[in-house]
Image (cartoon, helix red, strand yellow):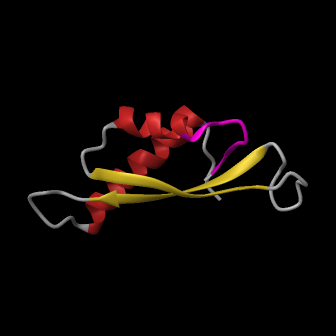
Amino acid sequence: MEVAATLPNAEIENVLLKLAEPLLVSYECFDVFNDPSGVKLPADRKSVAYRFQYRAADRTLKAEEVDAAHQKVLEALTSKAGVKFR
């Protein structure tokens, strides 16, 4: 994900908490990249990588269910945190 360099990860996680997608059971930021030179990424932006885990306690999820839940997550991050996807 590409976000403003000044956006704290806490804001991304707040969006995920408020969304309260029931199938999203965990998420973890595992990489942050910025390029002050602006060569690989504009200097005022950073790349943030998250791992999302989807699960239902009572059944095996179908791909369509995970896709729909993930789409909700992506839309919330785009509209509420200004995330762009690379």
Q: Position of residue 19 (x, y in %)?
A: 36, 36
Q: Position of residue 44 (x, y in %)?
A: 81, 42
Residue name at image x 20 percent, y 64 percent: 61
Q: Is residue 12 left or right of residue 18?
A: right
Q: Quadrant of residue 79?
A: top right
Residue 11 at x, y = what percent?
A: 53, 34
Q: Which residue is at 57% across, 35% downward?
A: 81
Which residue occupies 45% across, 35% down? 15
Residue 57 drawn above or below residue 76 = below
> Where is residue 69 shown, x and y percent of the image?
33, 52
Q: How many marks?
A: 0
Residue 57 is left or right of residue 16, and the answer is left
Q: Is residue 7 magenta?
A: yes
Residue 40 or 31: which is nearer the viewer? 31
Quadrant, the C terminus: bottom right
Magenta part of the chain: 2-9
Judge from the rendering whether residue 73 lies leftward or rightward of residue 49; answer left or right.
Answer: left
Give left or right: position of 56 versus 63: left
Residue 70 painted magenta? no
- The single residue placed furthest to the left in the displayed view is 58
Residue sitting at 48 percent across and 48 percent down?
A: 74
Against 17, residue 72 (above or below) is below
